Amino acid sequence: MSFGGYPIVLTGEIATMSDTHGSSVVGFASAIPENYFRDWVARRFFSIRSDKSGRVLRAPYGLAKVEAALLAHGYTRNDVIIADPYKLDKVIGPNTRIVGIYVMDPLGLSYGSGILYWILKLADLPYRGLPYIAKSFLQVINHPAIKRHRNHIKIVIGGPAGWQIIDTGRQGELGIDVVYEGEFEEDGPHLFDKIMKGEPVPGRVVAHRPVPIDVVPTIVTPSIGGMVEVTRGCGRGCQFCTPTLSGMIRSFPFEGHIDKEIKLNIEVGGFKEITLHSEEFFRYGARGIEPNPDKVLDLTVKAYKLVKSYGDDYEITTDFTTAAVVKYAPKMVKEVSEYMNEGGTWHFIEMGIETGSPRLLRLLMQVRHCHTSLSSTRTLLRKPLEYSMIITGWLLAR
């Protein structure tokens, strides 16, 4: 690609685009305020793997899905690039029409940044400036290459934290043309078509519905952390949670979808650990709130056999679940742990502390979900902290 630039440049906050030297846990350091990170230290800590042209070798999973959707829609890799934010000079030029920026915490308002703020305050340590992840967002959006070509570029913000831009009312101040909320695969490519044609577009776009599973293409750029999406949505309806936008939980098929992304992350991405990503892994294959243990175990076994076909040192893990589902099907959790904690290895799984309070559920969950949530919670979740500890024990202390 000549210096004319790519028509569509996809990138993200520097901290989000980094694989933090292969450790996703280390990525939480992005919540540390900028007074603890000199720029030269941050550049080494949040390094990004990319080729000479500026195309990243690994991308945040959500951004890889945006690229895949655009390619499936008819754009080519000469039209679209997932770019290293350190190398925007190499990819933005007179031909560039869209810069899409994927955000996880652009203004430093996430729970991670908030928790670290109070930890430092309680420890009587100085907190100055922004969390580094927010600073790294501003470094991207104010990049000289974007400013130089601003008269013919539309800046589109998307990702889990687009709400921060909307809720703070800072969209105009930051010079953001469009904030896109919700799943990208159906409405997103058509929005990009309009921008490419020079047609007017609204400042805020909300996807009109959760995308059907058969519309979602597989990624073509390996994902940071070897992440492979196995479900979307949740269905519990908590008003404070972004996955609520994706509706009821939907599960991707193993053959032709999950297996393709596992192979890509191993063969191209070079990963030896595959993360089966879900908002609630133990509800894979479920049609409602209650889990389907047979489907979960079938997925686990198939993924395990596939990664092990590459060598004994290849592993699978997952990321999220809830205490309620663990209480409902403890045998299922134990059986899955046999494959994810093989040989005494330890893998962490994230979960929040849930409530059994009808009052809080009525406040925080949509009315149409209240009956199911209240009835299941009364029977499944009388001691939420205790059950959080149970799953931690099963998955970590084998």
Image: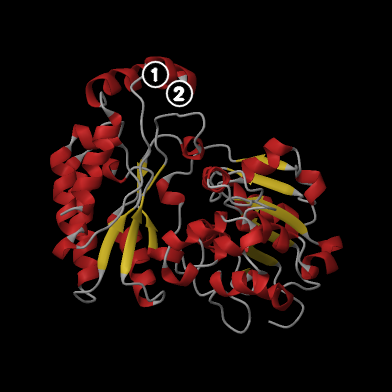
| Structural crowding at the residue carrying mark 1, measured as other residues with C-alpha within 10 Å and reported as few (<14), some (14–19) or many (≥20) | some
Q: Is residue 373 left or right of residue 43?
A: left
In front here: 297 or 103?
Answer: 103
Q: What residue type is labelled 2?
A: Met
Given the current orientation, which residue lies at the most extreme front position?
124
Q: In the image, 35: left or right of 354?
A: right
Q: Which residue lies furthest to the right in this view?
A: 151
Up the image or down, 247 lies above or below 211; here it is above
| Residue 349 drawn at (x, y percent) | 32, 50
Q: Where is residue 25 in the image (x, y as percent from the top left)?
A: 42, 59
Vertical placement of 394 versus 48: above or below? above
Q: Residue 257 carries which label?
A: none
Count of marks, rendered view: 2
* x and y percentages locating residue 97 in the rendered image: 76, 63
In the picture, the disc for residue 365 is 2
Q: How crowded is mark 2: few (under 14 residues within 10 Å), some or many (20 or more)?
A: some
The image quadrant that residue 227 belongs to is: bottom left
User: Which color scheme is applied?
Assistant: secondary structure
Q: In which quarter of the image is the C terminus?
A: bottom left
Q: Does residue 223 appear in this view?
A: no
Q: Which mark is residue 370?
A: 1
Q: In which quarter of the image is the N terminus?
A: bottom right
Q: How far apart are marks 2 and 1 (CA)?
A: 7 Å
Compared across the picture, whether 270 is left or right of 77 comes to left
Residue pictured at 62% horizontal, 58% vertical: 132
